[in-house]
Amino acid sequence: ESTRYRLIELLESSNHEYVSGQFLSDKLHISRSAIWKHMKELEKDGYIIEGISRKGYRIVQSPDKVSGNTVHWGLKTNWLGKNIIHKTTAASTQQIAHQAARENAEHGTVIIADEQTEGKGRMERRWHSSKHKGIWMSIILRPSIPPAFAPQLTLLTATVLADVIAEQTTADPKIKWPNDLLINDKKAAGILTEMQAEQDQIQYIVAGIGMNVNQTDDDFPDTINDKATSIKLETGHDQQIVQLIQQILLYFERSYDMFVQNGFPNIKNKWESYGYRMGESIKIRINHNELKATCTGVAEDGALLVQTDREGTQKIYSGEIEWFH
Ligand code: BTX
């Protein structure tokens, strides 16, 4: 298993150029016929490998079949996703994550499912998670920050997803406070952060990520068809799910490490640069009151900052604001 992993690393680091069997055999301290056998195994996992005598081997195509292995191979993180639990079907990856966390799963454990039959949104809402069409993933974190700062991790997660979409696709993502990722005003991803804390200490956090990737219109139920979208619907292109997962994990790790080291300011700036209707004058409805306001940013405690005519800058906490033009 670890040989296989090194083998893929060596092949991938060559950037699709041929790598000689002799070189691989020297590096891995195994015979050239053992190398050949490993190649056959990789092909079973969905890799397309070209082997040419005198030149060597190269990866023509990496698989898009999600498994613990395919996500692990080629994953460039230091600590995130070293432990991956993959299910072809799950009620909810959040549930599996809570259970694993209670059984002491390590910081950075990742749970991924091909489909969820009871995907969870906030406040007991449902998250539609159709098979092989999106990323349904939960990350177990054990941060040493006060529980009051936990909402910052939701904001962090949103910036990670926005960065990945912006850099890997042609779509233009926006983050709608507190936890929606929009593309062209429709919801393409959602985040559910759940925390287990005792007194002043976080025991663990489960950061749930749902991202619509390759759905077409038929894949969404009628009830959400007009407000949900996928990266494919917005860009016209299929995306490789394994690659996207690896990218999300890499960016998440970088962002999280920076957050632990430098605190909130970087996250705040990045969040605001993606913020939905930032600087625009909007009407928001909070508890039946309609206010005219301008969104100006996010606060340390995760609140949305708005500027109102009457009362100056206000912090908004309710997750149930409605946005009007
Ligand atoms: P939310 O409460 O902000 O959004 C839920 C609402 O979004 C639903 O009521 C529905 O209107 C709409 N919706 C449902 N499914 C979709 C979808 N696929 N795309 C767009 N809109 C939809 C957002 O909650 C948080 C979602 C987190 C999901 C992840 S998946 C991995 C992890 N496991 C799990 O059970 N939940 C998280």
Image (tube, rainbow, N blue to C red):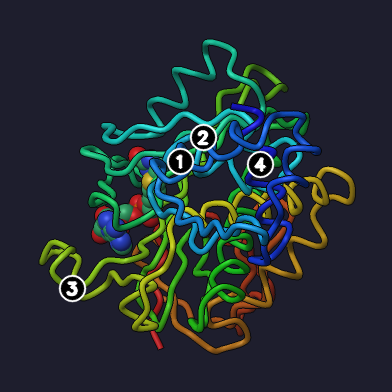
Residue ID for mark 4: 7
| Callout 1 secondary element | helix
The residue identified by callout 1 is: 40
* Residue drawn at 83 percent across, 51 percent down: 258
Q: Are marks 4 and 3 in contact (CB under 8 Å)?
A: no
Whether ligand 1 has any atom under 8 Å from the Cβ at mark 4 is answered as no
- The one nearer the camera, 36 or 137, is 36
Instruction: Tell me the CA gap for discs 3 and 1.
Output: 38 Å
Is there a contact, CB below 8 Å, between mark 4 and mark 1? no
Residue identifier under label 3: 217
**Mark 2 sits on what residue?**
37
Looking at the rendered structure, the kind of residue marked 2 is Lys
- In three-dimensional space, the C-alpha distance between marks 2 and 3, rounded to whole angstroms, equals 43 Å
Up-down relation of residue 149 to residue 314 (above or below): above
Q: Quadrant of residue 195?
A: top right
Q: Secondary structure at mark 2?
A: helix
**Amino acid at the residue labelled 1:** Lys
Q: Position of residue 288 (x, y in %)?
A: 34, 65
Q: Which residue type does callout 4 highlight?
A: Leu
